[in-house]
Amino acid sequence: MSEDSAKTLLEQVTGWEVKNEGDILKLHRAWKVKSFAKGLEFFQLVAAVAEEEGSPPRSSSCWLE
C-alpha cells in the first residue's frame, strides 16, 4: 500500500495506525479483551463478517495482559 493510500484509509477509521513491516505499509489496530475466550469470540465474529464480504483476514492475534 502506498503512503497516500494509507493516509486516506486512516481518515476513514478511528484507532488504527500505519506500521512499516519490511518496507510494506500495513494498517494495524490492537484490541484488549477481558479473557482469551472473549478474544476468540471477537475474532470469530470478525472472521465471519470478513468471509461474508469475500475478504478473510490475513492474520489475527490476541494477547492477554
Image: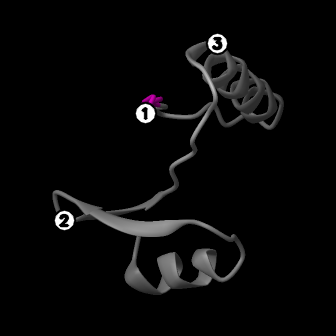
Badge 3 is on which residue? 37
Q: Which percent across, then down, holds residue 44?
A: 70, 20
The amino acid on which the numbered mark 3 sits, given as a three-letter code, is Ala
Question: What count of labels does the image hold?
Answer: 3
Q: Earlier in the sequence, mark 1 or mark 3?
A: 3
Q: Tell me which segment is drawn in magenta.
A: 61-65
Quick check: is 51 in the magenta stretch? Answer: no
SS at badge 1: loop
Indicate the quadrant containing the N terminus: top left, top right, bottom left or bottom right: bottom left
Q: Left or right: 3 with respect to 47?
A: left
Q: Choose between 4 and 21: the one closer to the eye.
A: 21
Above or below, comparing residue 30 to residue 12 in the picture: above
Q: How far is the residue under mark 3 from the one under mark 2?
A: 34 Å
Q: Which percent across, then down, holds residue 12?
A: 72, 76
- Residue sitting at 69 percent across and 21 percent down? 38
The amino acid on which the numbered mark 1 sits, given as a three-letter code, is Glu
- Residue sitting at 57 percent across and 34 percent down? 57
SS at badge 2: loop
Residue 65 tag number:
1
Residue count near mark 3 (Cα–Cα under 10 Å), binned few <14, some 14–19, many ≥20 = few
Q: Which percent across, then down, holds residue 24?
A: 27, 62
Badge 2 is on which residue? 23
**Nearer the camera: disc 1 or disc 3:** 1
Q: Mark 3–mark 2 contact, CB under 8 Å?
A: no
Name the colour scheme. Answer: one colour
Q: Choose between 13 and 5: the one closer to the eye.
A: 13
Q: Choose between 61 and 54: the one closer to the eye.
A: 61
Q: How far is the residue under mark 1 from the one under mark 3?
A: 14 Å
Q: Earlier in the sequence, mark 3 or mark 2?
A: 2
